[in-house]
Image (cartoon, rainbow, N blue to C red):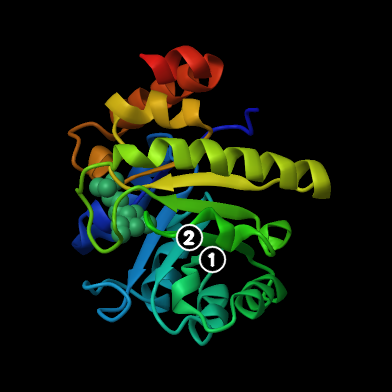
Amino acid sequence: MSNGLRIAPSLLSADFARLGEEVRAVIEAGADLIHFDVMDNHYVPNLTVGPLVCQAIKPHASVPIDVHLMVKPVDALVPMFAQAGADIISFHPEASEHVDRTIQLIRSAGVKAGLVLNPATPLSVLDHVIDQLDLVLLMTVNPGFGGQSFIERMLPKIERARALVDAAIARTGRPIWLEVDGGVKRDNARRIAAAGADTLVAGSAVFGAGHYADAIAGIRSEARAGQAAPAEAVAA
Ligand code: DX5
Ligand code: ZN
């Protein structure tokens, strides 16, 4: 079942000296969301940006800001990112002592809530919380760095997550997006969308390309083809 299609360029591969311009350029080039990777050198072995930078790009972002927290602990940063203009806040269950409480905290701040599953994290973490989520984010690399290779073994996991998300949508009548993050390129977008992802993060594949609009359009047309003909695309 298709649930729309969104392309979310990750600022991790943008030029950090010109972030506002980069945000405007990818939106002009067709980005549906801005993916904002927050790393703390504790939960993941890298360090990026915090709420001040989110606030600084907000006036440049005419599309939702999709904040991906790779931080531990999570809770203290939630109100700060809500205040800084985050539209979606996602976190890793391993980084919160009380996953349900963190989800409620995000929602009570008026922000959409997402849970992020690392490659080795089982889908069963969704069992008792999926009805509270707006987004399920599947990592297809281990978090911490841009430019890594897509882990092919994740394709069947995407398919299984799609079934869980569809069942939750049928139960609650609320939309839930299924996002995939890590190693997404034009040449695998068809298979990723065919497996059921409706929101594709792409960092190096967009910001590493000479022409952002061509890069986004290429990923989008491949993903659309995958959504249109899932079985054939998976076999291809
Ligand atoms: C990795 C980040 C990703 C990353 C994706 O920890 O969560 O969002 O920027 O970059 P690419 O698309 O280059 O794999
Ligand atoms: Zn990310």
Q: Is mark 2 within 8 Å of ligand 2?
A: yes
> Is 81 drawn above or below residue 123 in the view shown?
below
On residue 6, the disc is none
Left or right side of 14 for 90: right
Residue 125 higher or lower than 181, as above or below: below
Quick one: which residue is furthest to the bottom in this view? 76
The answer to whether residue 75 of the structure is visible from this angle is yes
Q: Does the rendering let one see residue 213?
A: no
Three-letter amino acid code of the residue under disc 2: Val
The one of 210 and 41 positioned closer to us in this rendering: 41
Q: CA distance from mark 1 to mark 2?
A: 10 Å
Image point (36%, 63%), residue name = 37
Question: In which quadrant of the rendered image does the N terminus lie?
Answer: top right
Taking the spot 37% from the left edge, 29% from the top edge, the residue there is 189
Q: Estimate the x, y position of residue 7 in percent, counting from the top left.
A: 44, 38
Counting the numbered discs, the total is 2
Q: Secondary structure at mark 2?
A: strand
Identified by mark 1, the residue type is Ile
Residue nearest the observer in this picture, 6 or 45: 45
Decide: few, some or many residues near mark 1? Use Cα within 10 Å; few <14, some 14-19, many ≥20: many
Tag of residue 116: 2
**Residue 35: x percent and y percent?**
41, 54
Q: Position of residue 62 (x, y in %)?
A: 52, 50
